[in-house]
Image (tube, rainbow, N blue to C red):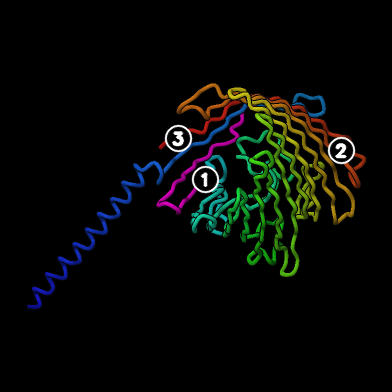
Amino acid sequence: MKKIYILLAILLLSSTIYAQHKESQNILEKLVWNEEMLNIMLDTRIDFQTTFNNGNFDEATFQGQTFKLWIVGEIVPGIRYRVRHRLNKPQSPLREGYSAATDQAWLAFDIGKHWTITAGKQSVQFGTFEYDYNPADIYLGTMCFNDLDAYKTGVNVAYKFAGQTLNVQVVNSDNPQFASDSYKKKALAATFLWEGNLFNGAVKTRWGYGAFQHQRDKFYHWLTPGIQFNIGKFTTEIDYYLGNRNMDYSSAVGMEDLGNRYVKDQSVGVNLKYNFGVVRPFVKGVWNKRYDKDFDKNAYQNMGVQAVVEVYPFKGIVQDLRFHAMYSYNNTDFLGNYGSMADQDQHMILVGLRWLFKVK
């Protein structure tokens, strides 16, 4: 009788394992072949750029600006995921467990028609329209856009109503820009973002506020409002950043090692775009200013302008293949303790291509 029971137990266990294997196999097959469950994309941009600094020919080089892998999909209705990984960035591990090259690795859960909870590594919810661009679409960024720690692990709760989205987010804040060395293992950040849609899309907003923990009772605050106006094929975007952080700006002022300084940074960006369809020109201007709070003096300010033409000549599978050309001019004026330094002028000419294509 014992042998019969043992045999029945083995058969039952085997059938259970087979059923689980078959179920896993079915899920894997769905994942591989279902267009909604799994999409794999490669995002690459390469440029040839020439740079003139203070009237001197300084650089002429091919530059791989972007090489990213995207994996996105919807597992079941209401449960989505995204992984975005940079293949041209050092794969150094972070304290929170992800590689520094992994921009995003999150799951999003829709709860009813209005609520979405996103958990994992994700974009920190700063405002401005510049911040919402794919980095492959940025040629001349503001100082704040270029330097802010953009991707952290945490949770975001979004509420959607009447074309508006309100986001409340809590993420790690262990970056040296914000957290002190003694508190970085405990530092968190809280952000709020209003993504607005007014007058049937004629006016859109991305107004953000963030509080980043430096010590237990000390926070660095950031205001990041952005507004967009749409009239036909013409778009205007105006962005503003204001906040405190710790930055080592030695290279900007030609010093060997200033170390981290407590600074207040401001940036303004104005972007004017017109969409002809195949041809899409735009002009952008930026203004940046850094105030060194340790010195209690301004450190420097910067102004820049760019003119860009993007061309999308194809349709179908290569519709996202574009060619682009850019000219930019930058001027840096040194202030305060660095006021005796001569202004810096930079001219850049850049041509290249970008292709976001679907592998699967």
Which of the marked residues, 2 or 1, is nearer the chain's N terminus? 1
Residue in the image at 17% along x and 67% along y:
12
Q: How many marks?
A: 3
> How far across and down, in percent of the image, does residue 248 sit?
76, 50
| Kind of residue sitting beneath label 2 | Asp
Q: Nearer the viewer, residue 316 or 78?
A: 78
Q: Please give the residue where the numbered disc 2 appears in the rendered image.
A: 333
Q: Majority secondary structure of the magenta segment?
A: strand
> How far across and down, in percent of the image, does residue 72 sit?
46, 45
Q: Is residue 338 left or right of residue 91?
A: right
Highlighted magenta segment, given as a residue range: 60-84
Give the distance between the C-alpha atoms of the residues marked 3 and 2, in whole angstroms. 44 Å
| Circle 1 SS class | strand
Q: Nearer the viewer, residue 220 or 88?
A: 220
Q: Is residue 23 above or below residue 271?
A: below
Q: Nearer the viewer, mark 3 or mark 1?
A: 3
Give the distance between the C-alpha atoms of the residues marked 2 and 1, in whole angstroms. 37 Å
Q: Please give the residue where the numbered disc 1 appears in the rendered image.
A: 84
The tag on residue 358 is: 3
